[in-house]
Amino acid sequence: MIELKDTCKTYQTKNIETLALRGISLQIEKSEFVSIMGPSGCGKSTLLHIMGLLARPGEGAVYLEGEKINSYRDKDVARLRNQKIGFVFQSYNLIPDLNVIDNVEIPLLYRSVSGKERRKLAAEALEKVGLSARLRHFPTELSGGQQQRVAIARAIVGRPKILLADEPTGNLDSKMGDEIMDILEDLQQLENTTVVMVTHDEEKARRCQRIVRMFDGQLVH
Amino acid sequence: MIRHIFTMMWNRKKSNSLILLELIVTFLVMFSLIALLIYNFRLFNLPIGFTANDNWTITIDTDEPLDSNVFTGLREYTEPTAIINIRDEAMQVLRQINGVKALHTINSLPFTTGGLTTGAYRNGQTEFVGVMLVSEGMPADIGMKLIEGNWFSQEDTGQDWRSAVISKSLRDSLFGNEPVLGEEITSTPSSNANLRRYRVVGVFDQFRKEGEFAEPRHYMFLRDPLIGERAAFNLLSSFSLLMITEGVNSGEFEQQLYTNLSALQSSLPIVRFSINPWERLQREHYIENVSPIIAMGIVVAFMIMLVGFGLFGVLWQNVIQRTREMGVRRALGATGSSVRKQITLEMVVLGLFAVAIGFVIVVQLPISGYVEALEWSLFWSSLVVSSISLLCLCAVCSLYPSWSATKVDPVEALHYE
């Protein structure tokens, strides 16, 4: 599904050059639930951003469903992100001025989907995460767990094949974190979604099929 | 996308209230200026009904005293012989100047306000009309167009009514579709001593003595009787002459006029004289009317520029504040151009809110009739132009901020606090 070959990524600031990824080669299979673990600053999020086409690798190649996407134009990369990848962030990143259903609709705004169809798909996605009763609420009126569920609904509303989650339970208590993990597991098992999750939590990582460990920009075997 | 942006802007109405207020004020100022411009442009494009080229007015003030009796026995009053003599002599001198094609008496300068007015009453309706007292042949000589009947002539003299040639607008107001020639108009409804009777002998198309920037009004042309009627209008100690010229050099001709009139001044009791070529009067009329519009336009342009900078700044800051949102949108599949489109549309939607609120305010003017000149067609055209102008301003001000929003790196934006 996703394949990285000898991927390197360097961040250049005025005086410092930081090597975030050092020749990572990794293959994620279709419908796999993978967690990426490692200490802070080891390059987990960078790896996730490269897999999610948010950042381009400095060296190496990235393949998505067998297609090398390194040389894709920004416009094409945006289209791929919109259609094939869903993102869930640690801090939810909901737009505070929009209510729940309007937030969930956002990915569909960048496709040619009618307003009525958008509403329908957003309502279905919210039903999957158990938030049908909160369609008109604003993010500030929801708990952290509910906000993360809205973020998951937003990530899956376009029925992507890949779901990338950057510490999705990092801001939640363990009960709410478990609820989020249940939803991610359901997505992977019932809808065959490929889920890649960055986490610090060993217990949550163990619920995944595979754990990828990183240290200092490299995979640890 | 539009509905999404409307929803978002509506939800942000509180945080956008100041910028919205700024846009409403800008809209109101734009509307005022544009209404003024369209109003004057329309007036300017209406025919004035005569030509200014080659016409000169000479006004001569004499030291002949006013007779207080003129205010009582109007009809019987005869102009002082002394004035008649001065005028006759002046006309004789001016007629001899090379290039003078015709010479007429006239009671008022064109391209100026003021002049004679009277009531025009018929069948219970009174209209307020401007009056021109002119000699025979004068209207045709200045290019006026007769559309019914004839100009007045010597045969009209000696009647208990005066023959009048009226403007089409006066005919339409008083007579509608009825025949007008030979019909009578009086100055007042009652038969008092000041009643003057006019018989319509002709109708002309248009005469806008006050010039291109004045609202058209009713006019009535009477033959200058040189007696009675002039007294009624208190035109006794001075008179004006209209000179129609042909093939003259303006500068040299004016010099010649000065020389001849100065010579006349030394032999006759002339207090002062003034020479006014109509082209100069027209030019002064333009300057007098266009200057305040230009001044107002400059002030408004500066104001719009300041508002533009304000909008630009607020929008730019808004984009910076929403860096994370831009990053999220990019992560969810927005392309650079859809982010740019969103920022521009947001500003245009805010402009639409301002237009909607501004409309509610400005529509009160034609409804209440508070500003008489702002009739509905002027209102709608001003509304359309000012709305488009405001929306364009919004779009232009959002160009750079929206472009900078497309440059947001999604990864950096997602870590932006």
Image: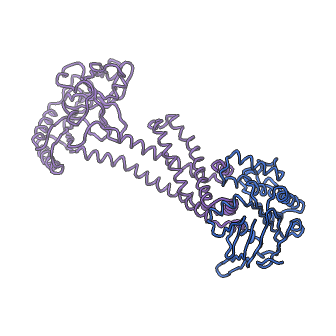
Where on the picture, by quarter, is residue A164? bottom right
Confirm whether residue B317 shows in the render: no
Where on the picture, by quarter, is residue A191? bottom right
From the image, which quarter does the C terminus of chain A lie in? bottom right
Give residue B385's position: percent from left, percent from top: 48, 45
Residue at 17 percent across and 24 percent down: it is B154
Q: Is residue B161 left or right of residue B380?
A: left
Residue at 41 percent across and 52 percent down: it is B295
Q: Is residue B169 left or right of residue B165?
A: right
B113 and A97: which is toward the camera: A97
Q: Is residue B279 left or right of residue B10?
A: left
What letter labels the chain drawn in blue? A
Q: Across the whole image, how many numbered discs are drawn on residues?
A: 0
Q: Is residue B359 left or right of residue B147?
A: right
Q: In the image as oriented, which residue stretches furthest toward the bottom? A: A15
Give residue A192's position: percent from left, percent from top: 81, 58
Give residue B229's position: percent from left, percent from top: 24, 27
Q: Colour of chain B?
A: purple
Confirm whether residue B246 shows in the render: yes
From the image, which quarter does the N terminus of chain A lie in? bottom right
